[in-house]
Amino acid sequence: MLLVVAGAALILGVIAFGLLRGDTFGSIDSSIKFLQASALAASGFRSTALPYPALALDPGQMFVPFDPPYVFRGATGYESVFSSGYAILAAPVIHLGPGVLRALSIFGGAATAAGTAWLAERGPRWVPAVLITFATPMWYYATASGETTLALHAASDEHSPGSVQLGFAADNLAEFYDRRDELGLSFTQPPTEMHGVHIARLRDIDGAETSVSGPV
């Protein structure tokens, strides 16, 4: 198991810091998470409100570079839709720069590989770990800043071993849900606030459950 973790972390580290630039962001998600963690650290762990340095020049906030569905207006300013748990984890080391977020992603990727190996029931356990880590988009999410979004869940009656659940984002989840009959969609869960964001669940044409997140 330790060899799986060490091997996955080493290869992911080479990709993240050797083949890719460690001081850049690959998506808006990554940059928002960086700002969220930076804001939490700067406030002494009192607030995750995203700072807007140009407020004096733009009091009407017409040129704020934050757009839904990545942020929403809160009582103290703009807030990220992403979990505050990640900001709490990253804030103590955020002063080291964007590269530290890649290190956290690599740790998440290596942990996913280890979890896959642990859950394997037959054959060499390192095989499914390698396949999950490098033959799926996992390698990207485990090398981008703050982008580890894949997760492993224990099998249950509702989720059989080996099943996958996709997730999508909608610009207006409430409108999307209201049009369910028009679009011919069968929802198993209406928009419900979970982990700081609203999530709805539906069945695709093959009967697989899919989640959709976004503002309402």
Image: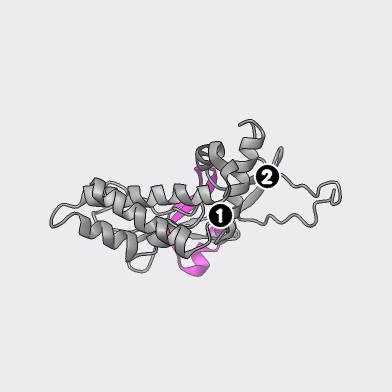
Q: Name the residue at 80% across, 56% down.
A: 62
Q: Amino acid at mark 2?
A: Leu
> x%, y% of residue 47?
64, 35
Q: Name the residue at 55% across, 47% down.
A: 82
- Whether the magenta-drawn stretch holds residue 196 is answered as yes
Q: Specify the quadrant of the image occupied by residue 63.
A: bottom right
Q: To which residue does mark 2 refer?
A: 50
Q: Which residues are magenta?
A: 177-203
- Does residue 197 appear to the left or right of 111 in the view shown? right
Q: To which residue does mark 1 refer?
A: 30
| Residue 155 visible in the picture | no
> x%, y% of residue 95?
60, 41
- Whether the magenta-drawn stretch holds residue 136 is answered as no
Give the mark nearest the N terminus, 1 or 2: 1
Pointer 1: residues within 10 angstroms few (<14), some, or many (20+)?
Answer: many
In front of the other: 133 or 16: 16
